[in-house]
Image (cartoon, grey):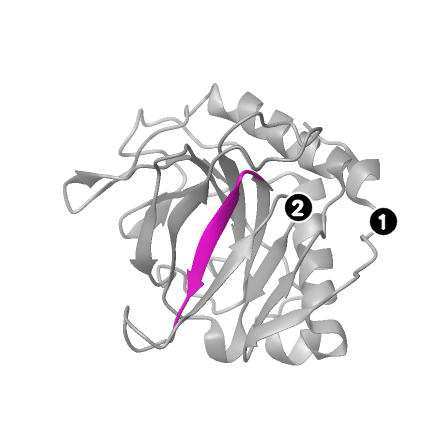
Amino acid sequence: MDQPRLFETPPAVRQVREVAPGAVHLPGYLSLEQQRHLVDAFRQWASGPVPAHRTKVRGHEMSVRTVCLGWHWSPYRYTREAIDVNGAVVPPMPEWLVRAGRDAVQAAYGSNTDAEACPAGEEGGYTPDTALLNYYDATARMGMHQDKDERSLAPIVSFSVGDACLFRFGNTETRIRPYVDLRLESGDLFVFGGESRLAYHGVPKIYPSTAPEGCGLAEGRLNYTLRHTGL
């Protein structure tokens, strides 16, 4: 599952939009070839050793289907084994995906990477050690939540492939306003860290039949979120 050459050259960044302090949207960041590789990799991982599954949160099954790499996330902790699925050890983080995450942070923050993005004492820059891969069908949603189960406050890196979505990015205090609504398209990158690392965020809507031809998905949205757990 390692294709280093596909991700060894960072994409040329055409536009950077700061949504909030430390929260950056980079439209059209991934090429169609890179998007297809993310889809192909997801399909392979989704078939095992831990299959794509719907996580239960407070007894309610989420509408997205998830695959974990490196560490398995279940409310509200990380483990090496998928304790809420089948007990199998999750696949490791591939080096090409670690490198893609590091390039994404560099693209988002530029020369501010060391100060704002990297955990203290980490050599080599941002090094994600887990990824949550979420697949949304046309009816799937993600409620407003914080990513706060990590010990590290290194940024979250998010790649989108397939159908566009309405992405809601809020504040660090409450699930309600103020928040910003933006549309994430196939190939978009979104990074949030620094002051916005613990901001509430969610996906209230998927826009069916908006996936571009050649991205690898005929329907639905695939979202890769990369994190540094600090574990």
Dominant secondary-structure state across the stretch colored magenta: strand
Disc 1 or 2, which lies upstream in sequence?
A: 1
As for residue 216 lying within the magenta part, the answer is no
View extreme (left): residue: 59
Above or below residue 184? Residue 194 is below
**Residue 187: which numbered mark, if any?**
2
Please state which amino acid type lies under the numbered disc 2: Gly
Q: How crowded is mark 1: few (under 14 residues within 10 Å), some or many (20 or more)?
A: few
Q: Residue at x 58, y 59 (%)?
A: 190
Q: Can residue 124 be seen in this view?
A: no
**Residue 169: which numbered mark, if any?**
none
Above or below residue 55? Residue 182 is below
Q: Which of 34 and 9 is in front in this view?
A: 34
Q: Nearer the viewer, residue 145 or 138?
A: 138
User: Is 30 on the left-hand or right-hand side of 228?
Assistant: right
Q: Residues within 10 Å of mark 2 (few under 14, many from 20)?
A: many
**Residue 9: which numbered mark, if any?**
1
User: Is 48 on the left-hand or right-hand side of 6?
Assistant: left
Q: Residue at x 29, y 37 (%)?
A: 55
Quadrant in the picture for the N terminus: top right
- Image x and y of residue 8, in percent: 82, 45
User: Is 56 on the left-hand or right-hand side of 7?
Assistant: left
- Image x and y of residue 219, in percent: 52, 28
As for residue 164 lying within the magenta part, the answer is yes
Please state which amino acid type lies under the numbered disc 1: Thr
Q: Tell me the SS state at disc 2.
A: loop
> Where are the magenta residues, as a range?
162-170
Q: Which of marks 1 and 2 is in front?
A: 2
User: Is 220 on the left-hand or right-hand side of 108?
Assistant: left
View extreme (top): residue: 47
